[in-house]
Structures are given as structure tokens and as C-alpha cells.
Image (spheres, rainbow, N blue to C red):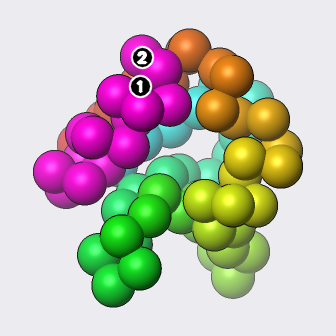
Amino acid sequence: MTFNQAKLYASNGYTLLLPGWKGYFNWNYKDKELVFKDGDYILTESQLKDKGVINRNDWYYII
């Protein structure tokens, strides 16, 4: 799925994964954005865009 589809799934409560990334992605309801978490390491949506994840289309959800 694409980045925009991933955001839609996350905003509906799904946890997402991306191949090559060790953490998980979910929705931050307070700030209304997709965030990445791996322990104490957190990336906001603007930081994710800098990492190039919006161009990926291999997102998948697990829960």
C-alpha cells in the first residue's frame, strides 16, 4: 500500500510495518499524524518524509 493508504489504516487504529525498518508505525491522535516508534526512538511524520518513506509502496499492517 502507499503512504497515504498507510496513513488511513493507521488513523483507523492499525499498526503498520515497513520492510527494512525495525520498529512500527501508528497514528498519533493528538497531533493527527503518522509516527514511527522503536523503543524510545520516535520519528514524526515530517521526519519520516525526510527519510523518504512517502515514496515507498510496500507498507503492510499487522493489527
- Counting from the top left corner in percent of width and height, residue 35 is at 53, 63
The tally of labels here is 2
Q: Residue at x 83, y 44 (%)?
A: 51
Q: Amino acid at mark 2?
A: Met
Placement of 53 over or under 24, stated as above or below: above
Local crowd at mark 2 within 10 Å, few (<14), some, or many (≥20)? few
Q: Residue at x 53, y 52 (%)?
A: 24
- Counting from the top left corner in percent of width and height, residue 45 is at 60, 59
Q: Residue at x 35, y 28 (%)?
A: 5
Q: Which residue is mark 1?
A: 60
Q: Which residue is mark 2?
A: 1
Is 11 inside the magenta-drawn segment? Answer: yes
> Mark 1 and 2 residues: CB-CB less than 8 Å, in contact?
yes
Q: Is residue 38 visible?
A: no
Quadrant holding the N terminus: top left
Q: Residue at x 38, y 43 (%)?
A: 7
Does dot 1 land on a helix, a strand or a loop?
strand
For this view, does 22 lie left or right of residue 27? right
Q: Which residues are magenta?
A: 1-14
Q: Amino acid at mark 1?
A: Tyr
Placement of 41 over or under 38, stated as above or below: below
Secondary structure mostly seen in the magenta stretch: helix
Say which of marks 1 and 2 sits in front: 2
Residue 26 sits in quarter:
bottom left
- Counting from the top left corner in percent of width and height, residue 59 is at 49, 24
Does dot 2 land on a helix, a strand or a loop?
loop
For this view, does 26 lie left or right of residue 17? left
In the drawing, what numbered circle is on residue 31? none
Nearer-N-terminus badge (1/2): 2
Quadrant holding the C terminus: top left
For this view, does 17 lie left or right of residue 28? right
For this view, does 30 lie left or right of residue 47? left
